[in-house]
Amino acid sequence: MQLHRSLAPILALAALSIACSSTPNATAPGANGGDDASSLAGDATPTSGTTMTCGGKIDCTPIIEIHDETGGSLKSGTVIPVDTGDLKSVTDGGGPKVMKYRITNSGNGPLTVSKVDLTYDAASPAETVPAFTCVVDDGIDDAVTPPPSCKDYKFPAINPPGYGGTTAIAFHVRFLKYDDQLQRKATLQILSNDKSKNKATKIVVAFSTSAGLAKILVQPADMDFSFVQIGGTKNQDVQVLNVGNSDLRICELDLATLPADYFTLILDGKEYAGGGSLKLEPCMVLKAGESKNLKLVYKGVDDKPHNGAIVLHTNDPSLTAEGGDGYKAIKVKVNSTGPCLVAKPSHVVFGATGVGAPAKRAFDLVSCGDVELSITDLTFDAPGAGPFGVDWSSLTQTGGLAPSEAAPLKIPLNGSVKVTLTYDPVKLSTIGADGQPVPDTAAITIKSNAIAGLTHVTMEGVGSSSSCPTAIITVQEGDTVVPQTILHLDGKQSYAGTGGISKYEWAVIAAKGSVSLFSPNTANVSPTFQPNVAGDYKFQLNVWDSAGKKSCFAAEKVVKVLPDQAIHVELLWNTPNDKDQTNEGPGVGSDLDLHFAHPYAATQDYEGTGKLSPWFADTYDCFWFNPNPQWGSFDPNMDDNPSLDRDDTDGGGPENLNLTLPEDGRSYAVGVNYYNDFGFGPSTATVNIYVYGQLVWNMTSTPLVKDDMWHVATISWPDGEVTAKSGKGGPSTLFVTSKYPHPQF
């Protein structure tokens, strides 16, 4: 007999209810208090005759639920901030901060909790009692009997509401504050027989102190003395403030970069000479909201620039990038303003110039300070001018002569003067081993009253059989950048003898694995280019004049692309069946994904190692669906979370992952998932790992196919050591899991 489709689900639910029912003596819901949501302790003692059974008829499914005392749900991967700002320390008689949690069962089968374990490593030898502990609330007064630890407690089976027996277990995570402002972290792991919805049987939660920390603010941030005449003195004051919510301690002031002949520090009415280190015993202590004044005195011995810093050694945990943990640098500048000279451009290119056909090129002397600029000399450096010269005829201020002490060239504030250089080659330039002509070069030193001292201008030219248009490349971002920087290339300074430039043609010799292209095209005078792979990029530019004559040789400019994060991971791949791996769009190329997992990452053991696999974990696997997870401190000023900065879905890559501040004592996992081949077939993947900008490890895979999961390597910190993950065939094989399941996003 065939059931009507509307009755089948109802009868199935009835059968399930019967199969998972309690024994006949089961107590009604709430009869023993176990279902009272306000009772945090729950009922930890089973009631006789009410144990839930399934009778072996069906696979009953327990579902673990964990709630805090506000009713909020505790999910795996959660990082719980522990606010310590208002707590008294142990030395001040403070007691524990208690965070209460309750385990219940919302399924239809008995829940077995095999472990509730809090892992914590003491941050200080002063911890006679661990800062973090976990205990079970057994309903007995703590003063009578100390509560059992979570780790040692034997948890009874937990029944769903309405089945009597134990229907809830409560436990507490306790935190004790110590008087040292160290950040403390703990990890809670809960193991159960909950396998519902393909969830892992392990729940991992982290606790981290996030408040009660000192934080320094300096106003003004820098000390700028401007220009100080010889024999004069000038004072500068700064306020040091504690804007945190715990005591700020300053135990040392480093004045090593501020010489004693020039600088004196005044603190609390006492004078301290520069040039060394000032240890404060006892440490200077600023309560929350308090401030302290520092005065620095500069004596003008000469007119040279003197730049340095006062480095404060503090207990501010957010300071990690200014020379050391807790270091706060107050930059000091003297004679860095006043008269200032800039030569634009500082490198003058004549390009290919016909022998016997001298060329002229100009550069500007710009007054960039806040005092009138006075130029008193301009001379060629050794070995001399060679075929180069200076045409002074246009300088009416000096009577068409070179400037001198007696007749200086004066340039007012924000003014400029154009100086003309000449190049008159007397022979053809030789050809180097690379096939390019070896240019003539020279340098000029300009003497002025600029505080920065002497200014230098260099020049180059090539003796040719005829004059050609000259290509010149400028890069707005400079010679060294980080991956994914958009470079603004410019050929506008290129020039021709007559008629101007009519055509541009760009090319690049890119770092291996790069598939980046010029935008909008290679013929644009000022294209952009985004290098996504670390390495050297040699840009080349040829130009044509209005008569159709091409530059005799291409201009070249090398830009180094180096990651500046502590850990930088690149994923590149090659798919032989994809004939154009530079095209973009849905399904036009294969899609491989980079994964970077925290040690807390845990799903099911899909890799067959007997341990939980880290891939596709909700919070602790950084990949395309979770590109900016919260792993570290909740302080927004702490750059301690990983970021997947580029996700490529249509072939070739790269995908880039960065972590600026890794955690000490951690080992991070790197993986590659072949997410979708879109019919293009196998791909080989290359992974490059950089530590502080240096390539320390790379590997190329054997061909991968759709749904392969390559467990590439681990990166331990702080040593930065990379260890390849070996497959079952030994060290020479890859650890690849075929048909690795992943969520449907």
Image: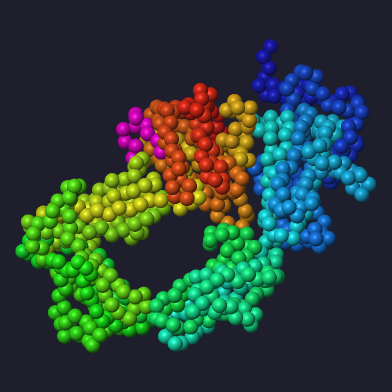
- Outermost residue on the top side: it is 1
Q: Residue at x 50, y 31 (%)?
A: 710
**Residue in front for this viewpoint, 195 or 473:** 473
Residue 545 visible here:
no
**Residue in front for this viewpoint, 305 or 330:** 305
On the picture, is 243 further left or further right than 690?
Answer: right
Residue 447 visible here:
yes
Q: Position of residue 242 (x, y in %)?
A: 65, 69
Q: Main secondary structure of the magenta part?
A: loop
In the image, which residues are magenta?
572-583
Is residue 574 one of those drawn in magenta? Answer: yes
Q: Residue at x 60, y 62 (%)?
A: 326
Q: Position of residue 580 (x, y in %)?
A: 32, 36
Q: Residue at x 80, y 40 (%)?
A: 150
Q: Position of residue 246 (x, y in %)?
A: 70, 65
**Residue in front for this viewpoint, 306 or 526:** 306
Quadrant in which residue 500 is drawn = bottom left
On the picture, is 493 further left or further right than 593?
Answer: left
Q: Relative to 338, is 184 above or below?
A: above
Q: Relative to 319, is 707 above or below?
A: above
Q: Position of residue 667 (x, y in %)?
A: 58, 41
- Is the N terminus in the top left, top right, bottom left or bottom right quadrant? top right
Quadrant in which residue 504 is drawn = bottom left
Q: Residue at x 59, y 68 (%)?
A: 312
